[in-house]
Each structure stands twice: as structure tokens, then as C-alpha cells.
Amino acid sequence: MNQGARIDAPGGLPTVSVIVPAYKASGTIAATLESIFSQSRQDFEVVVVDDGSPDRADLQSAMAPWRRSVRLLVQPNRGAGAARNLALLHARGRYVAFLDSDDAWMPGFLEAQLGHLERHPDCDMVWSDGVISGETALAGRRYLESTESVARPSFVSLLSQTCTVLTSGTVARKNVIDAVGRFDARLRRGQDYDLWLRLAHRGAQMHVLNEPLVKRQVVSTGLSGNCATELRRVITVLLGISRKLPLDVDELGILHRRLAILNSRLEVELAKQALRDRDVDAARSHLDQVTAIHNWKIRAARFALRVAPRLVREAYSHVRPSGNASRRKPGAPTAQSPAVL
């Protein structure tokens, strides 16, 4: 299935291809498309990839008002990376913009991002800040602030996660994305982070615009379970990067230090879950594996689990009850804040 495109550009080709992977997105895709077609700059095409959605009929119904202006591609469920790669193969713009199917752009997003790339021919990729929305304590906060993104873009700052990329705020030159082999479709999670690392290591010039031009949706699920999943995602990406790229000694040192911190934070999250499950022995075992985080809370928790395990179990089950809490969506960098129990 492949229909039409919105093109208001000289020569009949769009300046930018907007790529939207969609999976179980029937409830959010309308707001996403509305934000695209409300842009102040209109020289774009929209490519939506239905990634094996189980709600396909509802998805197509939600897209109906824009159906003649959207190119819809369909594939079996293979993940966001594979969906974006399919769209890249069909994209006709010299720039590509990525937007998740539950996020939205402010009306001036494309004008600001494309204008920056056109004014800075040395810039290969630019992203903007966003405002977090949804059922979360982070609602109303800026995305880059919430991820503690403070450093200028570089391979080292991306590797150490002192600089983070908002994928739904990203516009890049298509030839640069193509040159590094696009997204790694083998990665179900973190394929965007993996791509940014490979681009930066290759020498791509990246810029950040601090203006919040994206509405970043946060969904709700169990907090600790999600933290553990996201930590594993980042760990998997970094382990893969060490095999994909010829890192020098300094870069390997940064990578190993980051992995040590992430693995320790993962053990803390697993300890929390063990306490929720009232498994004191497992919680104690996980905390014993924490080697890269040194603070009084970790030391106090270890001590308490040794001298009064039953008391800790009962206290934690009352103070930190299990249940639903808000989280960042998959793909958002995590593990920036200190680990606590």
C-alpha cells in the first residue's frame, strides 16, 4: 500500500521526508499527523510505516483525513528500526525528519530545523528540545533537562550520556544516514541511540536547538520494571558499539566506565523489584553486585538487609508499593539520576 505525497517544492520533489513508524498507534496517530500538516513550512512528504499493527483497521481509519497526502507502507512487525529503514528506502527528500506516532511537533518545527540545516551546510543533523506531556510527574518539564543533557554533541558526550538526542525532534541529511548503513534493524530497542553513536564516530556534525518544538508523550507502566528494561537497552547498545566501531583507548575507557555504572544501576533496580516481591535474599544478592555506585543509601541498604532483613522487607512494601507509574517511552535515555532505594 503506497499512495500519494504532499509536495510543495520546486521540481516536484519534497525537501524533507517525514518518517513515522506506527505500531498500536490508532489512538495517537491523528494528533501526530495533524501536527505535521499544521507546519508553517510545507515542502515535505509524509511516509508512515505500519509495522505489523494489530489495530490496522483502526489505524487506517484514524489516518483517513490525511490518506491522500500520506504514503503508507506496510511490513510485518520487525520493530521501529526496520520500519524507519523501509521508509528511508522510499524517502525522496534530501533531508529526513523522524517523528514517533505518539509525539507531535509545534507548528514551527520544520521551519526552524530545516532553516538551521540550510544556513549551516556543515551541519549533518540537528534536533530540538521538547516538552514532556502525559500521566507523569515530569509533565511540563523540558526533555533535555529531564535527561540531564548538558554537553555539546560529540561521540564522547553521546557515549557517556551527558548529551542525549530527542529522536522525534531530529532532522538529518539523508545521505549521511544512508552512508552509515541506516538503523540497525536487529535492535528492537535503542536502534536510534546506536545510529547516533555511529554517526558521531564517523564525524557527523550535530547541533542542538534548545527551543522546545516537540510534544514528547510519556506513557504509564510499572516504574522499576521499565527502568530495568531501559538500562538493559542502553547496555545492549553500548556492548554492540564496542564491536562495531574501532574505539581508541580513551573511548574504550569511557565505554567501560559507563557500562560499570549502568550495570550497577541495573542491580539496584533489580534489588528494588526483589524487595517488592518480598525476596530479601535476591535483593541482598543484587546489591552485592553494585560496584560502581558509592553512596550512603546503598551502604545503608546493604547493612539493613543483613541485620534486619524482615524489617526492611515490610518497610519497603509499605513505602514503595508496586503498581503503575509514569515512565519515559522506549528509546528515551535513562539512568541519568543517582540510584536510590
Image (tube, grey):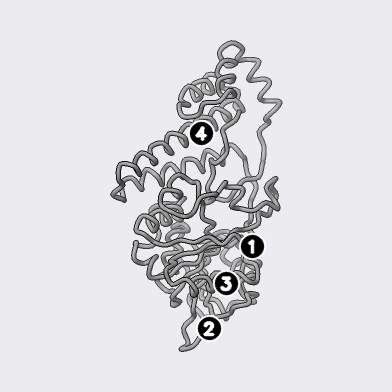
Q: Earlier in the sequence, mark 3 or mark 1?
A: 1
Mark 2 neighbour density, 10 Å: few (under 14) some (14–19) many (20 or more): many
Identified by mark 2, the residue type is: Ile
Q: Please report contact status of discs 4 and 3: CB closer than 8 Å, yes or no.
A: no
Quarter containing the C terminus: top right
Q: Which residue is mark 1?
A: 28
Q: Which residue is mark 3?
A: 110
Measure how far apart labels 4 and 2 are at the Cα level.
Answer: 47 Å
* Callout in the foreground (1, 4): 4
Identified by mark 4, the residue type is: Arg
Q: Which mark is residue 265?
A: 4
Measure how far apart labels 4 and 3 are at the Cα level.
Answer: 37 Å
User: Residue at the location (59% across, 52% down)?
Assistant: 144
Q: Earlier in the sequence, mark 1 or mark 4?
A: 1
Q: Earlier in the sequence, mark 4 or mark 3?
A: 3
Q: Nearer the viewer, residue 319 or 199?
A: 199
* Callout in the foreground (3, 2): 3
